[in-house]
Image (cartoon, rainbow, N blue to C red):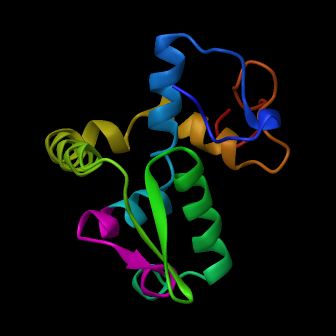
């Protein structure tokens, strides 16, 4: 399969587990999940998405760029606007299944210290130290 990505944006070939983890990493941001949930209801313009999520247009556009680049959504030009839609309707199924799993395991998910530590490390401005764990004395340590 050929790609329309610029050569500088390509990465070395990833193993199957790495590709799957990358796919789910695209779903790791609450704003991107919310955008995908909105688009599961049908195509929308950036203006419509901005109104629904309540974030600045620039932030929404950045998330849409990520989702578009990674193959979750595509845009079609309609006059002055881009209308975004899900590329693959199976994303709707993944969101639905995720919702069901969360419903059944909410207590466990919200109390998972491993994921909380990883999220804290990703949120730190300096990034996580080697090994991915926060340094002693930080929120996760």
Residue 105 in the image, given as x and y percentages of width and height: 20, 38
The magenta span reads 37-49
- Residue 97 vertical placement versus 43 (above, below): above
What is the chief secondary structure element of the magenta stretch? helix
- Residue 49 vertical placement versus 29 (above, below): below
Does 46 appear in magenta?
yes
Where is residue 68, by image quadrant? bottom right
Looking at this view, is 100 or 113 the one in front? 100
Residue 132 in the image, given as x and y percentages of width and height: 70, 25
Q: Residue at x 23, y 70 (%)?
A: 41
Q: Residue at x 85, y 44 (%)?
A: 126
Residue 81 in the image, given as x and y percentages of width and height: 53, 84
Q: Residue at x 63, y 44 (%)?
A: 120
Residue 15 in the image, given as x and y percentages of width and height: 54, 10
Quadrant of the image for the C terminus? Answer: top right
Looking at this view, is 112 or 42 the one in front? 42
């Amino acid at each position: 399969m050929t790609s329309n990505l610029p050569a500088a944006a390509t990465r070395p070939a990833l193993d199957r587990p790495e590709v799957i983890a990358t796919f789910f990493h695209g779903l790791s941001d609450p704003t991107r999940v919310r955008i995908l949930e909105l688009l599961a209801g049908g195509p929308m313009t950036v203006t419509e998405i901005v109104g629904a999520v309540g974030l600045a247009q620039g932030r929404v556009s950045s998330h849409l760029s990520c989702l578009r680049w990674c193959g979750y959504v595509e845009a079609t030009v309609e006059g002055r606007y881009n209308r975004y839609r899900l590329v693959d309707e199976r994303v709707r199924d993944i969101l639905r299944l995720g919702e069901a799993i969360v419903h059944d395991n909410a207590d466990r998910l919200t109390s998972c210290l491993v994921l909380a530590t990883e999220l804290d490390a990703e949120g730190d401005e300096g990034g996580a130290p080697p090994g991915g764990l926060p340094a002693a004395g930080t929120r996760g340590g």
